[in-house]
Every structure is written in C-alpha cells, then in structure tokens.
Image: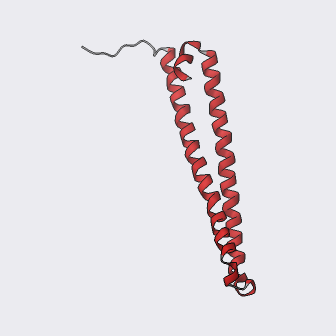
Amino acid sequence: MSMETNEPPKLDNLIFGEIQVLLAEKRTSLAALRTGIAVFALPLSVLSVLIATSRYYSFGKVMPLLVPLLLLNFGLVMLGSWLIYRSIHRIHHYERRIRELTQKYQSIAEFIE
C-alpha cells in the first residue's frame, strides 16, 4: 500500500519549511559573525604583543617589518569589520522575515516564539 497522494502539501508545512531555511541561514550568519570577531581580534592581539615588547627593539631597525605587518593588520581589521557588519545585517533581515511570517500565519506563531 503506497503512502503517496496527489494532494498538494499543506500550507503550514510550507511555512515551517521556509522558517527552517531562514533559521539555517541565520545559523550561517552567526558562524560568519563568529569568524568576523576572530579575524578582528587577531590584529588587536598582535598589536598588543608589539606594544608590550616595544622596549626590547628599536623602531628604526624594525620599521621595514612593522609597516607590512601594520598594513596586514589593517586589512584584517577591515575584513573582520565587514564580516561583522554583514552578519548582523543578515541576522536582522532573517528575524524580520520570520516575524512577518508569524504575523501573517497566526496558526504557526505559537511554535516559533
């Protein structure tokens, strides 16, 4: 005996599926946020080590090494900031879309919040 029918899926199932996809996208954005925070923190820790050990070296002698390092750190700070900004923006977008769906379909609102 086959369980397949030719009737379309229920609307609630479609909405739950859409919300599941939105929640998966939100988890992906949270992972990108975590990565952005890590990328942002790396240059700050490198700079704090450089500042803490600055009395052991002469800036004139290490300037050819410091300039590329500072440029790399600046690039990492910009990349981390962009990842953080984009992730937060996407998380707000997914939250807004889920809120719209729960307001439109009150029958599923009790399962979401």
Residue 85: % across, % down:
69, 47
How many numbered markers are drawn? 0
> Which residue in the rendered view is the most extreme toward the left?
1
Q: Residue furthest bottom?
A: 61
Where is residue 48 drawn, in percent x and y?
Answer: 67, 68
Quarter of the image for the C terminus: give it: top right
Question: What coloring was used for the rendering?
Answer: secondary structure
Quadrant that contains the N terminus: top left
Apparent side of residue 8 relative to residue 83 in the rendered image (left or right): left
Q: Position of residue 89 (x, y in %)?
A: 68, 40
Indicate the position of residue 35 as horizontal and vertical percent values: 58, 52
Depth check, front residue: 47 or 32: 47
The relative height of residue 58 versus residue 66 in the rendered view (above or below) is below
Kindly identify the residue that appears in the image at 63 percent across and 37 percent down: 91
Horizontal arrangement in the rendering, residue 1 relative to residue 103 (left or right): left
Residue at point 60% right, 19% down? 102
At horizontal 64% and vertical 44% (from top left) the residue drawn is 87
- Image quadrant of residue 9? top left
Tell me what residue is drawn at x 71 percent, y 71 percent: 70
